[in-house]
Image (cartoon, helix red, strand yellow):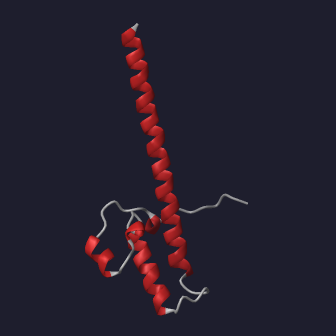
Amino acid sequence: MGGGHHYNPEAEPKLEQDAKAMADAKLPLAYRDTCAHLLMDLNKCRRATWWSPNKCGHERHTFEECEYNAYLQRCEAKVQENKVLDARKAAAAAADN
């Protein structure tokens, strides 16, 4: 249980996305995030295989891993933001004394 997870460079979220490619792929606005480049490939595979549940496993796994990595990045950014805010509060409290 757990452990043994490997690093997959394909599943890294990208900040720079091609807006024209996303529009051409007809991705809904809600899905145009840092993993949209993988969702376009996944949807292309799904259409080619008529949404077969036994196909496109690698593409789906890579997309889901990218979404998870993006979530972890947002959590880490929030932790860093809280540290900065706490430091500012402490500095303001020290200045008031």
Residue 70, image x, y percentages: 46, 57
Question: Image height check: is 32 above or below 54?
Answer: above
Q: Between 28 and 46, which is closer to the camera in this rendering?
A: 28
Q: Between 88 and 65, which is closer to the camera in this rendering?
A: 88
Residue at the extreme right: 1
Residue 63, image x, y percentages: 49, 70
Q: Considering the image in quadrants, where does the N terminus appear? A: bottom right
Question: Image height check: is 30 above or below 42?
Answer: above
Residue depicted at x 50% and y 55%: 71
Residue depicted at x 54% and y 88%: 51
Q: Quadrant of residue 57?
A: bottom right
Q: Between 28 and 73, which is closer to the camera in this rendering?
A: 28
Question: Image height check: is 43 above or below 74?
Answer: below
Residue depicted at x 30% and y 63%: 16
Is residue 42 left or right of 4 when viewed as pictured?
left
Residue at the extreme top: 97
Question: Image height check: is 33 above or below 91?
Answer: below
Residue at the extreme left: 20
Residue depicted at x 50% and y 47%: 75
Q: Between 10 and 29, which is closer to the camera in this rendering?
A: 29
How many labels sit on residues?
Answer: 0
Is residue 69 left or right of 25 when viewed as pictured?
right
Residue 82, image x, y percentages: 46, 35
Q: Considering the image in quadrants, where does the C terminus appear? A: top left
Residue 45, image x, y percentages: 47, 86
